Image (spheres, rainbow, N blue to C red):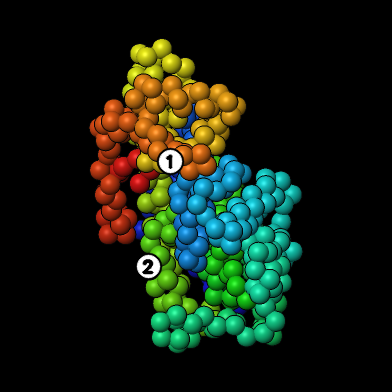
Amino acid sequence: MLFRYRNLTFQERQILDRIGEMRSELRYAVVQEPRRWTGLLARMTRARALRASNSVEGINVSAEDAIAAVDNEDPADADKPTWQAVEGYHAAMDYILQRCRSENFRFSIDVILAVHFMISQHDMAANPGNFRRGWVGVRNTETNEIVHEGVDRALLDPLMDELVNYMNDDESESVLVKAALAHLNLTLLHPFADGNGRTARCLQTAVLAHKGIQAPIFSSIEEYIGRNQQAYYDVLAKVGGGGWHPDRDCQPWVRFCITGHYRQAQTLLRRLTEAERIYADLLAEVERRGLPERMALGLLEAASGLKVRNASYRVTANVSNNLASRDLKALVDARLLVPEGERRGRHYLPGELVGAIAKRHRLPRGIPDPFDEPDASLSQGSLFS
């Protein structure tokens, strides 16, 4: 028996419909009618999800190193163990999303074990690619109290088989709910010695991709979870009740995830609006100075608050190492970028004009709780917030 949620309320259906409408807007903007800067937005969205999901486990990297991981470049700051963990999660997400592109793809135990192996291969104590051998519990690091116990080992294998069947079937009336329940069940079953949360969050995004959600990079709520870690822990503890109790009400978890999708979709729509406006102004400044159009993309990267590195600019503008160096020097000479650091630590910050343009187009941040204000109009927010 797994946690199931069979009867959506009228309010939940309303909110899911609104999320669907927002996702349609996103699909149009990033899939059907992409702008030149859409690729940068996709990379930054992927990097935020990567950074957030790892931060939940206490694995922290800078925004610039998260971009480097997405670009398959070397980190600027992360130490080796941290970087191995980040690269492993990135590889696992690449793997499962690539597999989900096949029309014949089916979830299986082997697929889940492969995802776990990639996530945990840097830590052999986690027994990567294998279910735990016996009992496992999660302790409060401050009190040493056991706050959650995984399902009895003798029940784990048949329940994992049931979970795989659930992920493959078409019973759920909402793919967002199915993905949320895949995440919940795997987390509370706690099938691994370590890496359960990251594997569960990876699979939640994979279910969305498998069930036809286009542009899964823009459908993940990993960033939202990372920004709301305590609420995430609290709702899992509330629903789980300290162990494996699939008879408990999982509505709080379902609503947490629905709220995450609602707020994440609004955040992405804000970013699209702001990026379009900022890029237009940056392009005008570049053209006014007789510089190549591609340089506006690097300025948009800086306007987002990132430290622009030669490596990141090469990907953003699709240029060689030497041309990237020349472009960045030209932008510094034009006072559109400000250089900092030397050699490997060299990076670029927005100049005064670029900062002013970004500030001018920042939109209000507030996003209501859809369950408190289900009829509230979409609010506007800030770029890359």
Sequence-first disc among 1 and 2 = 2
The picture places residue 135, in percent across and down from the top left corner, at: 62, 85
Any part of residue 176 in sight: no
- Residue at image position (29%, 27%) is 353
- Residue at image position (39%, 19%) is 286
Relative to 101, is 280 above or below? above
Apparent side of residue 128 relative to residue 85 in the rendered image (left or right): right
Q: Quadrant of residue 280?
A: top left
Few, some or many C-alpha atoms within 10 Å of disc 2 (few <14, some 14-19, many ≥20)? few
Choose between 105 and 320: the one closer to the eye. Answer: 320
Which residue does the numbered mark 1 point to in the structure image?
341
The picture places residue 312, in percent across and down from the top left corner, at: 52, 37
Measured Cα–Cα span from mark 1 to mark 2: 38 Å
The picture places residue 25, in percent across and down from the top left corner, at: 43, 37
What amino acid type is highlighted by mark number 2? Ala
Which residue does the numbered mark 2 point to in the structure image?
231
Choose between 51 and 149: the one closer to the eye. Answer: 51
